[in-house]
Image (spheres, rainbow, N blue to C red):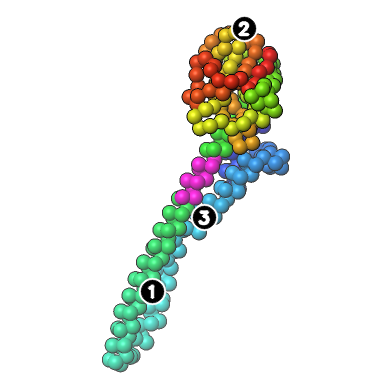
Amino acid sequence: MATDHGEWLERGEIYALGALDGQELNEFELHLASGCPICAACVRETRETLTLLHRSLPPEMPPNAVKSRILERITPAVARQTEQTKASWFTWNWLGIGIGAFATAIVAIVLTSNLKHTQNELERVKAQLAIAQNQAATKDEQLQLLSSPEIRLVELKGLDAAPAAQGKFFWNPVLRRGFFIARGLPQTPADKAYELWGITGNEPVAVGIFTVDEKGQARINMPPLAQEKSFDKFAVTIEPAPGVVKPTGPMVLLGNV
């Protein structure tokens, strides 16, 4: 059974084409039934793209044999007409040619517009698929980190600068990396950001910087640390936006390992 979400998305495109069968079809339909929004969007958007491509195809021209039979029926009638009728026919013929050329130009413009629209839709779908794949990869990475037996949960509590704030840091001391969740923090000015620190005794080490959304929340994958130190505390301070080597601002969160 597929475990990588990129493989689910590949199956989703094949499923939308109606070419998925056997065990893979059963597995993918069970996956869709589980309520995966990413794969459901993939199938829907792939089908929409196929519909746009079908609509953009040019109409087929009639076979030469059909055109020949039509001309055979028209020619005798034309030969029996008078000179005046011929002149009138030529007038209408030229008018018809002009109208036909104009109609052909209109059709060409419409087809070109449809093709451009279809290409734009394809690019939009590709971009959305890339975002979904990146999100799926990030979630898989988080699951691997959180399911590791070495993971440690550090709960950080708000201090005087933000008493209602809370933080949870899932720290893997073996991989030297972690996943941080914060809530209840006030938004910082544009030139400020929050910085997470690992503390050994009285020596802080910068772990990463982050900002919060309008709800005061943040979910951050912290990159691996180069320093091989054991931390007994983690803290969050307010610092200049690029981050600093040593803390200079007020501490808002603190927790023991």
Question: Which of disc 1 and disc 2 is earlier in sequence?
Answer: 1
Name, please, the residue furthest toward the front.
160
Provide the secondary structure element on which disc 3 rests: helix
Against 201, residue 122 (above or below) is below
Residue 187 vs residue 170, the one in the foreground: 187
- Asked if the stretch drawn in magenta spans residue 176, the answer is no
Is 108 on the left-hand or right-hand side of 242? left
Residue type beneath disc 2: Gly
**Left of 166 or right of it: where is 128?**
left
Query: Can residue 127 be found in the magenta stretch?
Result: yes
**Residue pointed to by mark 2:** 201
Q: Main secondary structure of the magenta part?
A: helix
Look at discs 2 and 3 and give the one toward the viewer. Answer: 2
Q: Give the x, y percent position of residue 253.
A: 65, 21
- In the picture, the disc for residue 52 is 3
Quadrant in the picture for the N terminus: top right
Look at the numbered disc 2 and give the secondary structure of its residue: loop
Looking at the image, is mark 1 or mark 3 earlier in the sequence? 3
The amino acid type found where label 3 is placed reads Leu
- What's the amino acid at mark 1? Ser
Tell me the magenta residue range.
120-129
Q: Which mark is residue 68?
A: 1
Mark number, residue 178 = none
Query: Is tag 2's residue or tag 3's residue first in the polypeptide sequence?
Result: 3
**Disc 2: CA contacts within 10 A as few (<14), some (14-19) or many (>=20):** few
